[in-house]
Amino acid sequence: MYAIVDIETTGGYASANGIIEIAIKIFDGREVVEEFETLVNPHQLIPRYIQAFTGITNQMVVDAPCFEEVAEKVFTLLQGNIFVAHNVNFDYSFVKNHLDHHGYTFHAKKLCTVRLARQILPGFPSYSLGNLCHSLEIELKDRHRAGGDAQATVLLFKKMLENDPNNIISQSLNRNSKEQLLPPHVSKSDYDALPASPGVYYFHDQKGKVIYVGKAKNIRSRVNSHFSNNSAGKQKQNFIRHIYTIKFQVTATELMASILESAEIKKLWPQFNTAQKRPEETFGIFVYEDQNGYMRLAIEKKRKCSNPVCTFHYKVDGHGVLKKLVKTYQLCPRLCFIQTGSDPCIGIEEQHCNGACEKKEMPQGYNQRVVQAIASLTDTSSYVVLDKGKTEEEISCIMVEGGSFLGMGYLPKSMKEISSDSIREYINPYKENSYIRMLLRSYIVQHPQRLRRLDKPPETLSHR
């Protein structure tokens, strides 16, 4: 049996919105054998645009039952049947969220008539319920009301059952099929093309614009995880609704995927990426000379045209680095603004300040150590990180020149020696950012054997 469902709601996601009308039609493949329809009091105001869209007003639902009063009936009708709806994940997320909230554990197989229609009835300019019914000459009464839309979905689904010689509907219900999980507009061929390899994947909207970039050790598995839960939250529901196509780029390693993801996010600025869209490097360590001739280090907010010694996303990270410099190079915590107030210098007490704050140490000697501390923060080395390639005939290569990330690519295993000049033609350039620098620093610490210096005589290339 099929439970064909349509709902009207106060908004686009279930976690903060309510159902204001629900219609369920139990369909045996030939006719509707049972049906249920009711307005629902959501115990929240219906936005004006929803009232205009559906014709359902606040006054109409005042005396309607709340969902708790109809939950048992809804659960009884749905339990054991296949849940069918036009854009099924939207209706399913609301109904499941409301049932779960009132103590009914609900799970069902799902069929999306948007996805099915694209496969069984291809070639139409639009697959919205209204436009599709118009194209197929299906009568649609009471548009944007649960009962009218549910009845139209019954007629649409019946037409698809009658025109499905390739058993697409049955295949969609197969346990291994992803049809139940994919967003309504995403082609299964896009999903089937995804490799089980490291790389970056791109979600595009209806106009082809990239709205999300992600990286993965296994692209297929990671994309699947986006769709395998039916979160009722606003972000997830908006996200799913906007995805139309999926594309990808394979990389040889997970590190290369992480670097490519970061570069693409900074370049494309996708709508649904948030983690790496914060401002770059907000704070910096600055150096200046005071009236007494002592060079002083200070953490300040980075401003346009300023020239910090090094930069950080968070002030606390800068403090950590500065405290380490103070102890390593015997600097004064007062002159570095780590200690404020009138208490005795803790650096003198801990024996790493030689008294510059009390003018017991002359500026020349103190300043030499400040210069050394600054130099320790500046990495001007050139190197490559070598690892496995995408094929047996190549080696992956990430290149850093003069302390700055240059790009990455793939070297032939037949290459005799490695130097900046010999590998440059194989490197695709990418714009550097602080996240990429952090990735590389962390990776090199954990995998020093992958590092090859370029500021030394050329080495023979061999894969490690």
Image: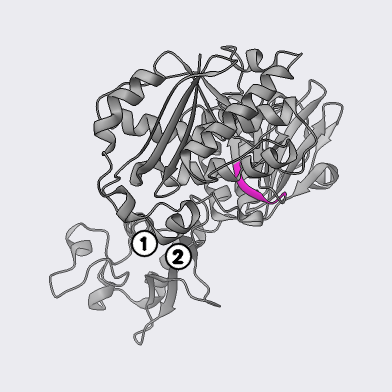
Q: Are marks 2 and 1 in contact (CB under 8 Å)?
A: yes
Residue at position x 66%, y 56% in the image: 267
Q: Residue at x 72, y 44 (%)?
A: 454
Q: Is residue 301 left or right of residue 249?
A: left
- Asked if residue 391 shows in the view, the reply is yes
Q: Amino acid at mark 2?
A: Thr
Task: Give the magenta part as a residue range.
Answer: 208-213
Residue 355, given in percent of the width and then of the height, sits at 25, 70
Relative image position of residue 219 (x, y in whole percent): 63, 29
Circle 2 residue: 282
Give the residue displayed 25% in from the left and 25% down from the top: 103
Splitting the image into 4 quarters, where does residue 163 fall? top right
Q: Secondary structure at mark 1?
A: helix
Q: Percent x, y for residue 161?
A: 67, 18
Residue 160 located within the stretch drawn in magenta: no
Nearest to N terminus: mark 2 or mark 1: 2
Q: Secondary structure at mark 2?
A: loop
Q: Which residue is mark 1?
A: 315
Q: Nearer the viewer, residue 423 or 155?
A: 155
Q: In the rendered image of this protein, does residue 419 appear above or below residue 225?
A: below
State the residue lying farthest toward the left. Answer: 343
Percent coordinates x, y for residue 283 in the rendering: 43, 66
115 in relation to 321, above or below = above
Report crowding for label 2: few under 14, some 14 to 19, many 20 or more residues within 10 A (C-alpha).
some
Dot 1 amino acid type: Lys
Q: Is residue 70 left or right of residue 444?
A: left
